[in-house]
Image (cartoon, grey):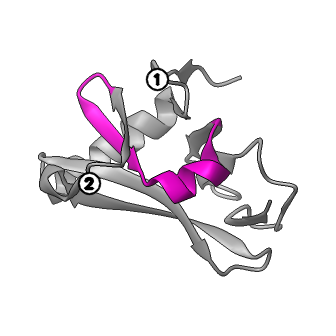
């Protein structure tokens, strides 16, 4: 089992592997970035996960902010309704590797794991 780094709020959790990977990707793009996690309409199950880097200046007043030793993960309140308790993991396996989302709010997920319904 992969160790999970927990936020003090426990809204979005990241494993050590996921945190290491996003920090690696952030360094390639610029050090003053945070990770925005959210949902949008689409995907085979109705809602799909989204992740992207943003500058700290793009954090909105009503965003949820989770701090992992200085690295910030941001989520808008509407997405948080679907993502509360989410665990973000990362695997470098050749088959099935990449970021994986374990979402306790998903009633159904597609085979690729990138979309869900709630």
Residue 80 horizontal side relative to residue 117, left or right: left
Disc 1 or 2, which lies upstream in sequence?
1
Magenta residue span:
68-85
Q: Residue at x 55, y 25 (%)?
A: 10
Residue 66 position, x and y percent, is: 38, 33
Quarter of the figure with the N terminus: top right
101 in relation to 17, above or below: below
**Residue assigned mark 2:** 60
Q: Nearer the viewer, residue 43 or 60?
A: 60
Instruction: Give residue 38's position: percent from left, percent from top.
Output: 50, 59
Judge by depth and name the residue closer to the eye, 113 or 103.
103
- Residue 78: within the magenta? yes
Residue marked by disc 1 = 7
Task: Please rate how many residues cluster around mark 1, counting C-alpha atoms within 10 Å: few if below 14, some from 14 to 19, many from 20.
Answer: some
| Residue in the picture at 13% in, 46% down | 31
Does the image show residue 93? Answer: no
């Amino acid at each position: 089992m992969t160790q999970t780094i927990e936020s003090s709020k426990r809204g979005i959790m990241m494993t050590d592997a996921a945190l290491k990977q996003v920090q690696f990707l952030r360094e390639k793009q610029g050090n003053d970035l945070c990770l925005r996690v959210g949902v949008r309409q689409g995907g085979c199950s109705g809602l799909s996960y989204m992740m992207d880097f943003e500058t700290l200046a793009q954090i909105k007043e009503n965003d949820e902010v989770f701090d992992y030793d200085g690295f910030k993960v941001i989520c808008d309140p509407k997405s948080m309704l679907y993502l509360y308790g989410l665990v973000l993991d990362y695997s470098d396996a050749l088959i099935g590797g990449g970021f994986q989302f374990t979402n306790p709010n998903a009633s159904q997920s597609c085979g690729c794991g990138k979309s869900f319904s709630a």
